[in-house]
Image (cartoon, helix red, strand yellow):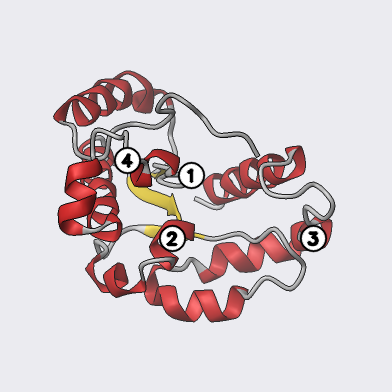
Amino acid sequence: GTVKKDPTTLCATSEESFAFLDGLFAALLPNFTSRRFNIGCDETFDLLSPRARSAEAVRELGAGRVYLGFLKRVAAISRKYGKRPMFWGDIILEHPEYISELPEDVICLNWGYEADHPFEEQAAAIGHFARKEVVGSFAKVGLLALGAEGEGEGGCSVHILKCFFLLLCLLHD
């Protein structure tokens, strides 16, 4: 892959990031009827960058703690607009020591790039935050059979699958 020179994600420790998201959610969320909202919180490329504005906090507190703080703040903003937050679980699974600190109402979404992805093991780690009924619906429509084989991480099929999974979660509402 290529190295990105400039930051591509929101700063996890900046009040400006939270103000931006609050304004964005205020403008957009009233246009959607679903009670659920995917706040993302994956692909945290800049969190570990020594050039990131959050680098000092990451050195001081650790990447997992900084990530959890960001996730909790963004989840709180989505709740302010009557939405139940969902987020992609890949990063929290890298920091299992913080899973118990997730807010009770968040829905952890998970996916895998390979046919032998350890979904069961990860669902057990995520515990009650995993949406078993959504995962069941997901499998029923054959999406797991489609997979993302041959595309690799970040491939077109992966992004299509993530979008389809999100759509399925919203339709399941």
The mark that comes first in sequence, 4 or 3, is: 4
Name the residue beneath numbered marker 2.
108
Q: Mark 4: which amino acid? A: Pro
> Label 1's element?
loop
Please name the residue shown 36% across and 67% down the image: 95
Q: Position of residue 27 (x, y in %)?
A: 32, 18
Between marks 2 and 1 in the image, the one whose residue lies nearer the viewer: 1
Q: Report which residue position mark 3 lands on.
A: 142
Task: Give yes or no for contact between labels 2 and 1 (Cβ–Cβ under 8 Å).
Answer: no
Front disc: 2 or 4: 4
The three-letter code of the residue at mark 2 reads Cys
How packed is label 3: few (under 14 Cα within 10 Å), some, or many (20 or more)? few
Say which label, 3 or 2, has the lower sequence index.
Answer: 2
Front label number (3 vs 2): 2
Which one is nearer the viewer's eye here, 57 or 139? 57
SS class of the residue under badge 2? strand
Query: Viewer-proximal residue, 113 or 171?
Result: 113
User: How far is the residue under mark 4 from the one under mark 3?
Assistant: 41 Å
Identify the residue under disc 1.
Answer: 43
Q: CA distance from mark 3 to mark 1?
A: 26 Å
Amino acid identity at mark 1: Glu
Per the model, the C-alpha gap separating discs 1 and 4 is 16 Å
Badge 3 marks a residue whose secondary structure is: loop
Residue 121 shown left or right of residue 150 in the figure: left
Which sits earlier in the primary sequence, circle 2 or circle 1? Answer: 1
Q: Quadrant of residue 159?
A: top right
The first of marks 3 and 1 along the sequence is 1
Residue 69 appears anywhere in the view: no
Q: State the CA–CA distance, disc 2 to disc 4.
A: 28 Å
* Dot placed on the residue nearer the N-terminal end, 2 or 4: 4
| Rendering quarter of residue 142 | bottom right
Q: Residue at x 63, y 75 (%)?
A: 118
